[in-house]
Amino acid sequence: MAGMKTASGDYIDSSWELRVFVGEEDPEAESVTLRVTGESHIGGVLLKIVEQINRKQDWSDHAIWWEQKRQWLLQTHWTLDKYGILADARLFFGPQHRPVILRLPNRRALRLRASFSQPLFQAVAAICRLLSIRHPEELSLLRAPEKKEKKKKEKEPEEELYDLSKVVLAGGVAPALFRGMPAHFSDSAQTEACYHMLSRPQPPPDPLLLQRLPRPSSLSDKTQLHSRWLDSSRCLMQQGIKAGDALWLRFKYYSFFDLDPKTDPVRLTQLYEQARWDLLLEEIDCTEEEMMVFAALQYHINKLSQSGEVGEPAGTDPGLDDLDVALSNLEVKLEGSAPTDVLDSLTTIPELKDHLRIFRPRKLTLKGYRQHWVVFKETTLSYYKSQDEAPGDPIQQLNLKGCEVVPDVNVSGQKFCIKLLVPSPEGMSEIYLRCQDQQYARWMAGCRLASKGRTMADSSYTSEVQAILAFLSLQRTGSGGPGNHPHGPDASAEGLNPYGLVAPRFQRKFKAKQLTPRILEAHQNVAQLSLAEAQLRFIQAWQSLPDFGISYVMVRFKGSRKDEILGIANNRLIRIDLAVGDVVKTWRFSNMRQWNVNWDIRQVAIEFDEHINVAFSCVSASCRIVHEYIGGYIFLSTRERARGEELDEDLFLQLTGGHEAF
Amino acid sequence: MEQLSDEEIDHGAEEDSDKEDQDLDKMFGAWLGELDKLTQSLDSDKPMEPVKRSPLRQETNMANFSYRFSIYNLNEALNQGETVDLDALMADLCSIEQELSSIGSGNSKRQITETKATQKLPVSRHTLKHGTLKGLSSSSNRIAKPSHASYSLDDVTAQLEQASLSMDEAAQQSVLEDTKPLVTNQHRRTASAGTVSDAEVHSISNSSHSSITSAASSMDSLDIDKVTRPQELDLTHQGQPITEHAISLRCSSKQAKRHIDFTEEQAELTPHSYLDRETSLLLRNIAGKPSHLLTKEEQAAKLKAEKIRVALEKIKEAQVKKLVIRVHMSDDSSKTMMVDERQTVRQVLDNLMDKSHCGYSLDWSLVETVSELQMERIFEDHENLVENLLNWTRDSQNKLIFMERIEKYALFKNPQNYLLGKKETAEMADRNKEVLLEECFCGSSVTVPEIEGVLWLKDDGKKSWKKRYFLLRASGIYYVPKGKAKVSRDLVCFLQLDHVNVYYGQDYRNKYKAPTDYCLVLKHPQIQKKSQYIKYLCCDDVRTLHQWVNGIRIAKYGKQLYMNYQEALKRTESAYDWTSLSSSSIKSGSSSSSIPESQSNHSNQSDSGVSDTQPAGHVRSQSIVSSVFSEAWKRGTQLEESSKSQVPNEKASTAKACAPEAAKTGSS
């Protein structure tokens, strides 16, 4: 027992006084003073501290943080001597889990308690478990960028802060599903709302806000982001993070394993959000055509999530439908009892007949639209001079199967055209149908189905018509353009505001009314997708961009006198010219033999097959970040083999850890 | 469902009439008018000669076709699951032909037509078959079915005319009411549409709309010719001529009565097929006017209905149509075979390999040559063959060639040359190849290789070529506009790949004055003639050409391509396994009939028979069977690979431009 003393009050054992501050790192904090010896165990010290404080409280999460050494004293059976603690040690008795504000990939802020004592890798894993995101090894945390104080004060609309700090997750077991969400979310309306925020895509951002957000203008700008990654082998406390600090949660390694829309709603949504912001903020470049597809998918996803159609639509095989119809049809006939008209209605494929104006662009003709009597039956469109001639031969008959259908609609201009590009052995015939407002939806729906080889008898015809009608009304409300009345995130539910869907450089390049039809055109190819499918499609399209998944770091190669960019992707390293942006050289991980880091001179040396050696020092980020990226990707590439097994944390830390790890 | 019951050898005309069911009355009037004109002209002068000639010409032409649109609706339900052998089928068809003609000969008026029709036919095997069909159609002229799908419309028309000539006025009138106008009508339409086969095919399928909707054939199938099971035919013969009803029932009920009236008198004349659907309708009609009908017929109809009911469960299979195609072999011979409309190219290839005992190399390919445009394409294994063939025009000189093409899977044998975007060929360890392929194809999305560089683009309608810097992206092919940098935001989209296929151009240096012969062409599969919608690109060397073509294939088909390769590899490997070698020869015996069951067996067998799924072992040809040790095996394949490159060159005399190039790549 420490603290034995003589009658005069002198201590006769080798005990000494240890002062421990209670609470977080705060010099003003209350403190307790204990009498300890070098042989005191940490566990005993903890017990004494609690006794001294003499307050009824759950202290189980508390531990001692040694400030000078920047380490937690977590081994309760170790003695003070073993730790090397002397009387001058500044110790803090505080909770290991502290609240942080997490900025999610969807840019929403979420308050939760993160472990400040475990290596970041484990802390992230715990956070991901709470958020029900599988494969936490793909994510990590970044320091929030330093905000410029002035701007912040100007105007920052009070944003909603979701709070999960009260939620405690039972350790070890996978959270059970309850009411369609992990059980721990269904406790209160508040946490439920939080789950919805996590698992459902956010509405498009305000275009004005989008324009104000910082965007990288050069490759070196793109390196900034990657200098902020935290070390995964050290704990938050060690990295100077304080309770209440803001951190970003992001997918760090662009190698997404086993994405499953069924089990991964949160992961899928957050990944989609990260991809979306990547594109909107021009972190990754794409072409105009690609942007339109991305915009159409965003529009579609937003529409579905707003309307609450989160579940999978009852996607039945249309071919089977037909068969069923045919079968029942056959039955009816075999019965031989069905009245004729029933039979007729079953065997008759609905058709459209109407006066439409038709325009066929040809060389050397200036003819405009001409009125024709048009009959649309099955997948074939025939037109006649007049209705009277309809029983005769049409002027032309076109089978629309396999054709391209392009809407050319301007609601305010009362223009409802359908452009058809019909393939034939001679080439493509181009034909424009000009409809009246009320005709358009039915004809358009018919054309779209016909292009897929289906007739208007198809079960999807009605829904297609409805979708087109919805579009038209949308165009009516949305045609005002964002210039006059900036749409907030809420307004975008009704109208299509194209500026919230495309990167700002397209906002500068195109007017809203130019963008809208192009987005709608692209939308028709994705209109049938369910929410999860559309998100997955978005992610896949993002992944197939040439620049996808490259993390940029500014480095200086050994022997070179100028800075260059090192791109790190999931399978290769790329040396990029800083000024021009051209790829100079690519090395693949599959050819890599070993890599070493010289922490003193901050140099990374890599050896590839055939005695190719590369060495560089890191300029924009610490070489630890480069090291972690390489090690991380190597680790991720082992997952296929270890499928279904527990995450091999040791291997990860071994591959990514710094010299402390050894 | 018509197939179900049967045999509609010949209801094309009725189908036609269905097409317009809605305005049938109107149209009918119009046709009558036309008919009058036609018959008048036929009577007054003698345009017989030219009329007769046309079918002749047509036929000789058809004999040259590399494939024909003869689709057999095999009713498996009625088949009782027996396999359908092509030869057997042909024999059957021949016998039917004879039967029909003998029956037809009972009627002296018709005999003329028929004998004429049959005499004209060349005797070669496939033409015989064609002849048979024709015989059928002509013998059944009264119901006048344009039995050969799109093609034979001409013949039918001509024959109809003949028939009408040879028949007496009254009979003629009634027949033509049924048939003729429709046929002519279609012809005219076709002509005006400017499209040939496709329009026709579709118009026919349109015309058979009632069958489409009511029957299970609701997939907008090209039920071009439905030749029915011989047995069924026999049945029909026994079971009385009920055909008239078939005719009439196709039409709206009002019409039906009319038809019945006149068909009645013809009842004895023609043996007819009928449809189950019609049978049921018939039942109804029977009730309506029993005075007209024999109880025998009624019974037969009921019997039929009963049968159909039994067959109902199997309707899905019954749905399947078959197409007879001619496949040119690399030695200038050709094979005629039947393909099921659901068959993939892989399945057809398997069949062909089994049949032709040519070994199971991965490189066996079905190559489509579009002779008019001088281009060719290797069909991908997952593609539907029938769908592709239906894009050909009816007078097409296109060919389907079965040959070994190294470039088909060169991408997977040496991925480093295609996926890394490098300029020079390189060697790579097998292990690394695997890793590379996995990286590219097995992730959550496929990585399209970064291919970019200067290509020559042919100007529309001119024989001049311009240089542009092109880039391949997953979303399409782009080029860098003049004076701009090579950044994504400034790229101009040249082409998106959804609607086009990539072809190799052949000998474009001569044809289009291309800078080199290494040309690739991008076009919509339906386009068969020169058009501004076809894009021609020319590469500086063969390597670039193959990189681009393979890059485009990856962008277009993605993971499917790799799955095709693995499937092909499995097939090859199982064929080399000793045990499965024997089993596969057994297989080949049974699989010559291309019924779906046998196909599924195939894949099962090959699945189970795989001894070694490692893609690293590139098994090439039978000659290496002797190598027992894996090392020797590997070495052997490598040797084989280089020596093999000559093989397609010799064998494939049909492939003009590309095979030598392929050889170069292979050996390099």
Image (cartoon, rainbow, N blue to C red):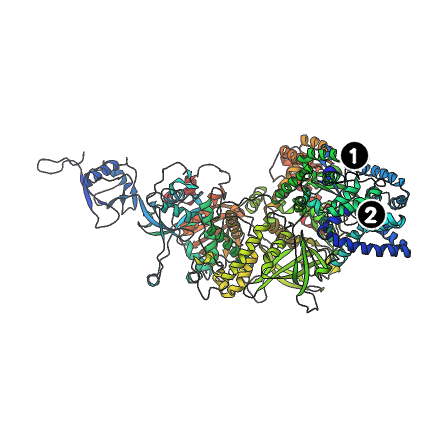
Q: Is residue A68 above or below residue B513?
A: above
Q: Chain of mark 2?
A: B
Q: Position of residue B585 (x, y in %)?
A: 72, 32
Numbered mark located on residue B295 in the image: 1
Q: Amino acid at mark 1?
A: Thr
Tags 2 and 1 touching, CB below 8 Å:
no
For the N terminus of chain B, give its image quadrant: top right
Q: Is residue A585 visible?
A: yes
Q: Is residue A12 left or right of residue B168?
A: left
Q: Which residue is mark 2?
A: B63
Report x, y in % for residue B628: 66, 32
Q: Secondary structure at mark 2?
A: helix
Q: Tell which residue pokes out farthest to the left in this image.
A: A8
- Foreground: B74 or B183? B183
Query: Distance from label 2 to label 1 (Cα)?
Result: 45 Å
Q: Nearer the viewer, residue B149 or B595?
A: B149
Q: Are marks 2 and 1 on the same chain?
A: yes
Crowd rating for badge 2 (residues with CA inside 10 Å; few <14, some 14–19, many 20+):
some
Residue A648 in which image quadrant: top left
Mark 2 or 1, nearer chain start: 2
Q: Secondary structure at mark 1?
A: helix
Q: Comparing marks 2 and 1, which lies closer to the viewer?
A: 1
- Residue B517 in sight from this viewpoint: no
The percent position of residue A242, horizontal first and vertical second, equals 31, 50
Q: Toward the viewer: B204 or B577? A: B204
Q: Residue at x 74, y 36 (%)?
A: B592
Observer-nearest of B541 and A348? A348
**Residue type (three-letter) at the residue carrying disc 2:** Ala
